[in-house]
Amino acid sequence: MNLKHTLKNPFQISFFTLFALAWLACSNDAGVSGESSPDKRATSERSTEVKKEETSPSSWSPPRTEERVNERLSMVENQIENRGVDDQRVLEAMRNVPRHWFVPLFRRGSAYEDRPLGIGGGQTISQPYIVAVMTQALDLEPGEKVLEIGTGSGYQAAVLSELTPHVFTIEISERLAKEAADLFQEKGYTVIQSKAGDGYQGWEEHAPYDAIIVTCAAPYIPPALVEQLKPGGRLCIPVGETFATQQLMLIAKMEDGTTTSRNLELVRFVPMTGDIQKQ
């Protein structure tokens, strides 16, 4: 069809020409299918990460539910508070995070018992008391950055996110890492950044950290984790032989880079796997 014969008015020609040019420009930018170009996707991912980094404690509202709230309150009163955990922010975090969200469906009846529970692949979710002890030992301030080694089901990371919106967590099991990431997204723990990987080397991209927590036992303290601590930073880690009783240790990094340590209590954790076993 000839536009010159169909559209007698020259203003009509200009309008349709401009419309067509604008449509072509949009199509070239976004793609006719509506998918972003690789550069656009990369920009979007970077923007999301920056947004998470900039979340302030006052703007972060952790998920809340009334599900099994009485069991959570009882867990804190009978299993945690009366055993020496007295940091009120930690106790409130334990009251608020629904542990049953992070327990396999067939074990949810036992979610608020004070014991570790299997989550598959030889991994466990730590008992509530130990989660509280380790969280208290980190002495997190609002807005500090914390790294967790051993995401597991995601419960410890969720507790940490009650204290600061800057939580990073690594899980060596790809299955568990994906399940935890999906759960964080589903339940609204949007400030937690997670990935599948070997936690022995830490997560250098986001270092340095104010605190690091390790939820699996290492035969010695991984040097990379100490390096990625800020001066004044704290590292809580169970140290000892595989499948034996280990010592839960708190490492503090001094301003000059040296460290001090103290033993908190005897524990038993599943072993750290990956590169640490090759050393």
Image (spheres, helix red, strand yellow):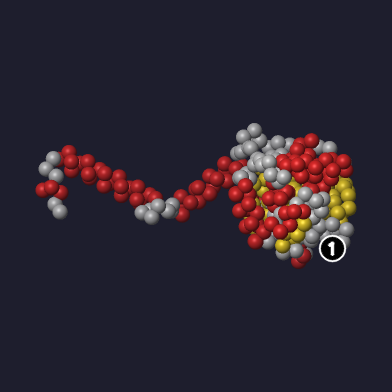
Q: Nearer the viewer, residue 39 or 196?
A: 196
Residue appearing at x 34%, y 50% in the figure: 27
Q: Amino acid type of disc 1?
A: Phe
Q: Quadrant of the N terminus?
A: bottom left
Residue at horizontal 88 percent and vertical 58 percent from the top: 245
Residue 241: x, y in percent? 85, 61
**In this figure, which residue is indicated by the disc labeled 1?**
243
Quadrant for the C terminus in the image: bottom right
Q: Nearer the viewer, residue 60 or 138?
A: 60
Residue 43 vs residue 270: left or right? Answer: left
In the image, farthest residue toward the bottom: 278
Which residue is pictured at 65% across the width and 61% down the height?
175
Query: How far across and down, in percent of the image, does residue 114 sit?
Result: 82, 50
| Image location (x, y in percent) of residue 153 | 70, 54
Query: Horizontal placement of 267 versus 178: left or right?
Result: right
Nearest to the observer: residue 207 or residue 45: 45
Q: Position of residue 129 (x, y in %)?
A: 82, 47
- Mark 1: which secondary structure? loop
Q: Nearer the viewer, residue 125 or 233?
A: 125
